[in-house]
Image (cartoon, grey):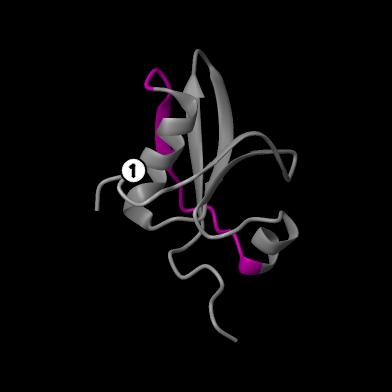
Amino acid sequence: MANEFPQGLYVVLATKDGVTEQWVAATRAKEARVAVQLQTGREWQVVVTDIPMTVTEAKRLGLRPGDVRRLEEGRLVGGHGQVRKGSAPD
């Protein structure tokens, strides 16, 4: 079976004023941090983690390649976006 997320799946933590949110980015590794930063704003500290996400989990959540979504209690919520060509550095 072909990999449905060839760019990867990355869990990203965003923190501001003692609040931490968990995000998932179905992007290339070097785009994941920037993609979440574009959703949260510059005042959030953003770190790509080594927390694994499987293709099965991503499909259960309804993710598509290029999606950037916030996670809460194991499901997607609120802010989301798509990485578009040219929106993050190569």
- SS of the residue under disc 1: loop
Instruction: Give the residue displayed 61% in from the left and 65% down from the top.
Output: 54
Task: Indicate the position of residue 36 as horizontal and vertical percent values.
Answer: 45, 37
Q: Which residues are magenta?
A: 42-55
Instruction: Give the residue displayed 36% in from the left and 39% down from the top.
Output: 34
Task: Indicate the position of residue 32 as horizontal and vertical percent values.
Answer: 41, 47
Task: Indicate the position of residue 88 as horizontal and vertical percent values.
Answer: 31, 44
Furthest residue toward bottom: 1
Check disc 1 and give the amino acid type: Ser
Relative to 34, say whether 40 is above or below: above
Instruction: Give the residue displayed 49% in from the left and 42% down from the top.
Output: 12
Which corner quadrant holds the N terminus? bottom right
- Left/right placement of residue 76 relative to residue 42 reads right
User: Is residue 45 on the magenta stretch?
Assistant: yes
Task: Indicate the position of residue 24 as horizontal and vertical percent values.
Answer: 55, 47
Q: Main secondary structure of the magenta part?
A: loop
| Number of dots carrying numbers | 1
Furthest residue toward front: 85
Instruction: Give the residue displayed 53% in from the left and 53% down from the top.
Output: 51
Furthest residue toward left: 90
User: Is residue 82 on the magenta stretch?
Assistant: no
Q: Which residue is mark 1?
A: 87
